[in-house]
Image (tube, grey):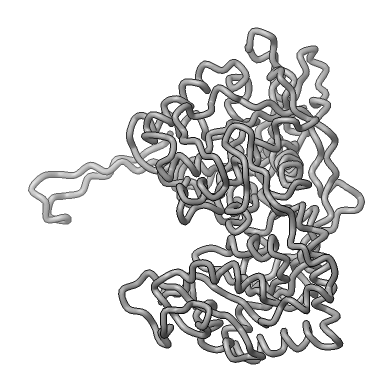
Amino acid sequence: ATCSVVYLHENMLKLPFPVVVLIFLSDILPRPVFSQHRQCVGRACTASGLHPQSKQNRPSWIPYAYKKEGRRAGPANLHEGGNGTELSWVLPRAESHPDYLHRKWSRKRPVGDYEGPETINCQSVEPFKFYILEEAKLPKCEGFDSGSELSRKLGGGRQLVGELFFYWQLQDHPWRTLDPDKAQLVYVPMFITMLVRGLCGPISNALEHVSDVLESNRRYSVNEGKDFMFMSTDYRFVFPLFYGTSPIRRRFHRLTRNFIVAAHLNGKFVRLRSVQGNSRCVVSAPHVSGVALAHCKGNKKTGLSCPGLSNELDFNSFLSRRNITLFMVGQADTRIAYQSRRLIVTQTAHVQPPNYIVGITTKRIIPPPVCEGLDPFKWNGCFTRSTVGPAYEAMLKRSKLSVMAGGDNPSSSRFYDSLALGTPQIILSEGYYDQAAAFRCAVDYSSIAYTLNEVDFTMAPEKSMRDALRLLLKDNASLLHKKWEAQRKAAPDLLWHLPDSRVAQNLLENVYRQCLTNYRGNNDAV
C-alpha cells in the first residue's frame, strides 16, 4: 500500500513529544476500476475468472460439491466432474420467472387493502432434501407434560416456541433424509428460546456443546454453515448468541457466522452485529399463539396436540357470539414506539362501542386515564400496570375485530392470537409487510386483514378508525364476512399449532427460495 509519513511538531498539538501519522493513500484515494471489471457481470465473472469490484456483480454463492471423506471436490460452481454446470437443485432468483411482479417500495405505508399487503408472486420450489442435526440438541432442556406447563415455565415467552413445533413437524416430513450427504439444508435444533429463558442450563455450556458438534461434523465443513439453519422468534436470542466477547461466544459466532436464521423479523430489521454481513440470510417466521398453546396436550418427546380453530362454522354464528366491536390489549407505555397504541387507547375506545381497549405499562407512573376497579372485564380506554389475565382470551373471543399495532418492532404475537380465535384484524403497523409478515408467497394479507396507514392514523386517530369500521361493518358487515372467511382459509399457513398446519412447509420453501438460490441473502419480505 502507498503511504506518506507526516511529522507534526509538538507545538501544533501541544504535546511534549513528536507524533508520527501514517496515512495510507490507498484507503483515501479512489481505487482504479479497470475496463475488464466493468464488463464483468454475474456468471461472466465466474467463467472468466475475474473478480468485479461491485458486490452486486460478484459471482453467486452455490454450495460446494464434496467427496465422501468431506474434502471439497472443486470450485463452488462445478460438479466433481468439473463440467462447469451448476448443481442441479439450485433455483434461479424469482425475478427470472416470467410471472414475477416487481415490488414497488414506498416510504408511505399502504392504505386499506389497495397496495402493499398483496401476495408476492414467487418462484415455486421443487422438493428437496433436508437433514436434522439431532446431536446438536441441548441435553439439559427441561421437559413438560402439557402446553399449559410449558406456558407456565416460559412466562411471557410462551408465544416464542415455534422452534419446538418446527422440530416436531419436520420429524415425519416427506422431504427429510437421514443421510446428510443427500441434504441441501441442515436444521440445527438448538431450542434457543428455552435456552435464553433459563430452561436448558447455562448458556455458555450450551454454546460450547453446539460448537463442539459443528466443528466435528463433516457435513458442516463442506460449506462452512452456509446451508445450515436454526430458528428462534424470541427477540432475546441475539444477545447471548451474538453479543459478548467471551472465548466461548467468539467461537460460536465464528462457527455460525454463515447460518441461515429464521427469526420473528426478516433481514431488513434483524441485525446481528458483525456477523450480519452479506453472507447471512434472515427470514421471518410466525409466532405461536399463546392462547392456543395453553390448551395443548402432550409432552416434549411426543409433541403437543392442540385444538383447531374456533367452532364458529358460519358467519352468522360468528356475529351472534361477538357483542364487542373492537379489541386491543397490549403494552402501551410512554416510549415513542408505542405512540399508535396510546392513541388507540385514548382516542378510539369510544368509537362504535362497546369496545375492549386496554393499555399496559411497566413504568412506575401510569399515564392517564388509569383503569379503575379490580375487575378487568369492565375496563376500557384506560391504562394499567397489571395484566388483564383471563379477560384477554375471553374478550378477544367476543370481539368482531382486533387491532394489531406494532410496538418496539412491527410484529406482534397478538396477530396470531386473533387468528387462532377467529377474530378478523385491523393491521396498524408501519413496516409490517416489509419486515415481519411471514410467507407472503402463500398468504394474501390484503384478503385476511384490513390495513390502516399508521402515519395517517396518528394525524387523525378517531376519524381513521371510524372510517375503517364503517367500511367493514356496512351492508350487513359484508367486507368483514370476506375477511373472516379468508382468515379461516389462511390459518393453516400461519398457525403452528393446528393439526393441518403448513407452517413448517412454508418455512422450508421460504428458506430454500430466499437463502439457497444462486443469489442468497436478498432478504425480501416473503
| Residue for point 35% across, 72% down | 363
Residue 526 appears anywhere in the view: no
Say if 485 sits above or below 436 in the image.
Answer: below
Name the spot of residue 523 as percent of width and height, x first: 66, 49
Q: Is 506 displayed left or right of 284 in the figure?
A: right
Q: Is 139 displayed left or right of 181 in the figure?
A: left
Residue 390 appears anywhere in the view: yes
Q: How many marks?
A: 0
| Residue for point 57% across, 36% down | 300
Name the spot of residue 65 as percent of width and height, x first: 72, 18
Q: Nearer the viewer, residue 506 or 117?
A: 506
Q: Nearer the viewer, residue 47 or 176?
A: 176
Extreme-top residue of the structure: 69
Q: Quadrant of residue 39?
A: top right
Extreme-left residue of the structure: 16
Name the spot of residue 23 as percent of width and height, x first: 35, 43
Say if 321 sits above or below 37 in the image.
Answer: below
Q: Quadrant of residue 46?
A: top right
Say if 209 sits above or below 490 in the image.
Answer: above
Q: Nearer the viewer, residue 237 or 384?
A: 384
Of the 4 image quadrants, the one containing the N terminus is top left
Q: Is 396 displayed left or right of 360 in the figure?
A: right
| Residue for point 23% across, 42% down | 20
Q: Is 12 displayed left or right of 110 in the figure?
A: left
Extreme-right residue of the structure: 98
